[in-house]
Image: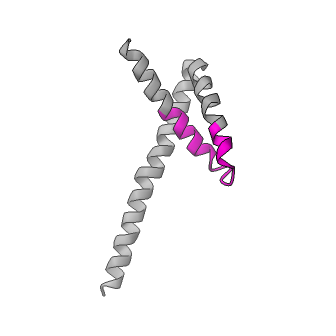
Amino acid sequence: MDLSFLVVWITGAVAVIGVMEWAKNFAPKAPTWVWAIAMPILAIGYAIAPDFVRLGAGIVAVSHIGYANIIQLIKNKTAKAASDAGGAQ
């Protein structure tokens, strides 16, 4: 197996997960079966998409995942530190 396939699979998986998480902002109460159906459709779409679409999907996905995990974590830690400091006085 060529290593480039593995890279495509991993980047495709990250893109699909990120785009799905981003899309969940528009339908937060959608049942889980909707996302179960959307995942293979997005994966196939990513696989056959032109390079500029893959690049855009990857950027959206990584930025959304990064925002959700990094920025929100920092905001939560800062807010907790501020509340702890306020309670210690």
Q: Is residue 26 above or below residue 56?
A: below
Residue 52: say if magenta: no
In this rendering, the answer to whether 86 lies above or below 40 is below
Q: Residue at x 40, y 69 (%)?
A: 79
Q: Quadrant of residue 2?
A: top left
Residue 20 x, y percent position in the rendering: 59, 40
Is 50 situated left or right of 9 in this image? right
The magenta region covers 14-36
Nearest the camera: 47 or 54?
47
Q: Quadrant of residue 51?
A: top right
Quadrant occupied by the C terminus: bottom left
User: Which residue extends farthest top?
Assistant: 1
In the rendered structure, the answer to whether residue 6 lies left or right of residue 21 reads left
Q: Residue at x 43, y 28 (%)?
A: 10
Give the left or right position of residue 42, taking residue 4 as reference.
Answer: right
Residue at image position (43%, 51%) is: 69
Q: Is residue 34 magenta?
A: yes
Please tell me whether the stretch drawn in magenta is mainly helix, strand or loop. Answer: helix
